[in-house]
Amino acid sequence: MKQLFVARRLLLVTCNFLFVAGLYAQADSLALKRELTLERDYNPVLKDASKINQLPEIKEPEAPQSSVDFSRFTLPYIVSPYLRTIQPDVYFSSPETCKQRGYLNLSAGLPLNIDGDWGYQLLNTHRDYLNIYVSHRSTRSQVAYLYDTGDATMKINDNNAGIFYKHHFEQAKFTAGMQYLNAAFNYYGSEMTLSVNDTYPVNTYTHLNRNQVNHLFHLYAGIESEENDEINYKINFAYNLFRQKYGSLENIKGPVENRYTVDFDLNAPFNSTNVIGLQGFLKSYFSQLPDSADFVNHIRPREAAQKYNYTTVSFNPYFTHTGDDWDVRLGGKIDFQFGGVTKNFLLSPDIRLKWLPADKMQLYLNVSGGINDNSYYNTFFENRYLNPHFRLYDSQTPLDATLGINLLILSNFSLDVFTGYRQTRDEHFYITDYWPGDKKNYTVADYVNYSLMQQSIAPVYMKAKTFKWGASARYAYQDIFNIHLQGIFYNWNCSKLNKDAIYGSDYIQALYPWNKPSFAGNVESGFQFPGLSLRFNLNYQILLGRKSYVVEEAKMKDIHDLSVKSSYSINPMLSVYLVANNLLFQKYEVWYGYPAQNFNIMGGISIKF
């Protein structure tokens, strides 16, 4: 019944927008000039849905892409934009599209949400290209707990800066860049799991309002040959630093992780339609867990002996063929891990097939796998509230397959239907963390005096098999109206709980995909008023079937999050916009015990110069 209700909601939203579009379909087509709006493009990406966006190459219906920036502090299944807020190499890639060198975006709203973006193009010649950019995202808002009394102050203050450079040689191109993110936030989760001793009520905990601070640094450089008929090459070097100020206690230093990466692709075309090549990478990790080895030994003795200084090496030989109506890639991945806590060898396939049996039909198959990089750096963008004492294990995926069909039903309407299967060892799931007060040397009093958090989040690991099936549809009418609907159902089969890898493994036995949805849906739509510089964009996100674990199984509220943005271009250089988030006034949680913002509004200005 719930899925039928959701389907009706999706249908209602779709019909309303199609009706409005139909009214304007009777009018004469207008030559609407597209403008580049220098705001961040909103790019909601559902977990496990990236293949849908990458595979089909049938000509999709096109519509002007309005930059829609909805709330950054709501849904956990939207890829966080913090280190990739604005990509100047994309924004200024075409001088014909935008002849201005810079942009400035400023917006604020209630509760206290503030956004800012600035970027400037220092060089843009046929050989050299250089951009710098900065961004700011912050909030300080009161949020009410769903399953506990009272409320809390959610604080986030992210500041990002970067530089991007590209140089074209005669037969190659060189790229380099650098990004830095300073991310401050608090663990505002509910206090229900911390009150383990009535002697120390929560209001006596002295450091709960202290902000955690993360420093993330990314430096990269690479060179790539211009495509030719002989040998093509690409090699990249990167360095990532993750440093956290505090452990879970204020008097414990946080983790530090250094990651060095080299990746390459060598290939040679032959017979005009074939390519043979070798891809690969080497990643070396050098980590320092929270300050004291004694602390680690007391809190999680099994993990203290495990190595977090390790290297992963991957080789991927492949062959590709391009035919008149089909493309195929055949290959395999060989992954080795030296040190670390996961199995040190993995074989997985690398198969991609696209076939056009008819002019407006494409069948596709993607089969892949590999060792998944769950570094501190990567984990931050998935869940910043993870207890600092946990460095996620690198999971292994021997098989991840997606099969689908893409249809261009009309010149402006496409439909993609797909199904998939994924098998992963040591798949991580997030549960509510609790403090084991009976551990040696660290008492409840220590937690009272030094804890930064009322509640944090911990991982559990299982072997997981995931079936998915879903559909994605796109429609566009001229430059007036566009809509994209997507829905994915998930079926999880979890087994083999890794008890050696979890904090407090004695208190959880259930095998369940904690915090994962059984259904994820999304509706994106835009409407441009003909003859006016006024545009509306809508985004509706749905997540159903999530559960968490807090001493026992706990059902989480479904998410129905509706946001609308209106933007008005005063002239080609200046525009204003207004965004309303959570228009359905839904109360839900990002993670269990961590509620999202309720209804909120932001207004802003965008300038090109």
Image (cartoon, rainbow, N blue to C red):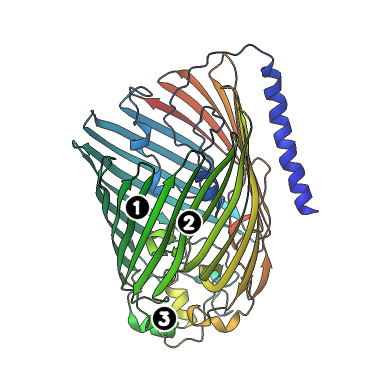
Q: Depth check: give the residue in front, 568 or 447.
A: 568
What's under tag 1, amino acid-wise?
A: Ile
Which sits earlier in the primary sequence, circle 1 or circle 3? 1
Q: Depth check: give the residue in front, 490 or 52.
A: 52
Q: Residues within 10 Å of mark 3 (few under 14, many from 20)?
A: some
Residue 121: % across, % down:
28, 31
Q: Is residue 372 above or below residue 327?
A: below
Q: Is residue 543 left or right of residue 341?
A: right
Depth check, mark 1 against mark 3: the one in front is 1
Give the labeled residue for mark 2.
351
Residue at horizontal 33 percent and vertical 40 percent from the top: 134
Residue at horizontal 36 percent and vertical 59 percent from the top: 317
Residue 565: % across, % down:
57, 32
- The answer to whether residue 328 of the structure is visible from this angle is yes
What's under tag 2, amino acid-wise?
A: Ile
Depth check, mark 2 against mark 3: the one in front is 2
Residue at horizontal 37 percent and vertical 84 percent from the top: 305
As measured in the structure, the alpha-carbon distance from the residue carrying label 2 to the one carrying label 3 is: 36 Å
Which sits earlier in the primary sequence, circle 1 or circle 2? 1
As measured in the structure, the alpha-carbon distance from the residue carrying label 1 to the one carrying label 2 is: 14 Å
Numbered label attached to residue 276: 1
Give the labeled residue for mark 3.
303
Q: Residues within 10 Å of mark 2 (few under 14, many from 20)?
A: some
What's under tag 3, amino acid-wise?
A: Glu
Judging from the image, what secondary structure is the residue with disc 2 in?
strand
Q: Is residue 205 above or below residue 1?
A: below
Residue 114: % across, % down:
45, 41
As measured in the structure, the alpha-carbon distance from the residue carrying label 1 to the one carrying label 3 is: 42 Å
